[in-house]
Amino acid sequence: MADRDWLAERFEANRAHLRAVALRMLGSPNDADDAVQQAWLRVNRADAGEVDNVGGWLTTIVARICLDMLRSRKVRREEPLPEPAAETAAFTCRGDSAESEALLADAVGPALQIVLDRLTPAERVAFVLHDMFDLSFDEIGPIVGKSAAAARQLASRARRRVQGQPPVGERDLERHRALVSAFFAASREGNLQALLSVLAPDAVLRADQLAVDSARANIQAGRPAPPLEREITGAAAVAATLNGRAQGARVAMIDGDVGAAWIVGTPRAAFLVTCDDDRIVEIEIVTDPSRLEQMDIVTFEPPDPS
């Protein structure tokens, strides 16, 4: 009982900060209150005995709940971004106290909220946590299910949009397209060395559970292929896993970034690719139909006729 009372006290001491985080991510006071309440229900069932930084732990829980709530919304991307007001570009929420954070989160004008609504859920969470609440990318990466480098890219892309800049420069777009094209061409050809040449040494491959289950079913059905796990780290392991795989994947623009997609009538899989310093640092395989429906996918290449 004493432990429960202590945890409740710590939660109440952080409530204003947690609501400020949720409000900035979700943009709705009611949704923010719901997120904080959901966080308390999770916290009340959890064991905080091994937690060193209770405030950071609580923030992580709220951020993950907000990410789930954002992903459940139907994202609209067809409307052009508005010109941000001066208060938008200059806004920061690194207050000296939870009270100041809450006041700033409530006071920010509608211009920033409009822009934030146009970001993808992961972009929004990475941007808010880093630029407004000063979390490190090492902390943000696990929250959005990505590496620290990929989380940095998400926040950078979101920052450019908030500041009214193009999300990706034309030269960067062409460079990323060349990297992604080379990678998936090598995958189709089974060229392991070519795959390794475009991967960063610490590259990460992530896959949703549906993709993992499908790969296992194919192996059980006698179609040999390297096993696919939820997360695979290191260039050699990533290259070996995708070598000869993704035969139907074609380079595509996915939510404004270069990636690849497998489309048979409708998208069956999306490969979200993060590039940095002329290398691919992360690939995320998405096969969940609910997530695919929310993505804006335009292919550069015609689908494989086979």
Image (spheres, helix red, strand yellow):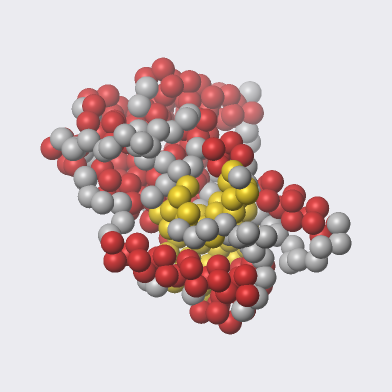
In the rendering, at what x and y percent does residue 262 appear? 59, 54
Q: Residue at x 43, y 33 (%)?
A: 75
The answer to which image quadrant residue 278 occupies is: bottom left
Q: Report the quarter where the C terminus lies.
A: bottom right
The answer to which image quadrant residue 33 occupies is: top left
Q: Visible in this render: residue 148?
A: no
In the rendering, at what x and y percent does residue 101 appear? 28, 32
Q: Residue at x 17, y 41 (%)?
A: 90
Q: Residue at x 38, y 56 (%)?
A: 153
- Front residue of this view, candidates 250 and 114: 250
In the rendering, at what x and y percent does residue 269 appear? 60, 50
Q: Relative to residue 175, is residue 190 drawn left or right? A: right
Q: Is residue 258 above or below residue 87?
A: below
- Front residue of this view, candidates 115 and 1: 115
Q: Relative to residue 287, is residue 300 drawn left or right? A: left
* Direction bottom: furthest residue: 193
Q: Residue at x 59, y 43 (%)?
A: 266
Q: Visible in this render: residue 242?
A: yes
Q: Report the quarter where the N terminus lies.
A: top right
Q: Is residue 43 above or below residue 57?
A: above
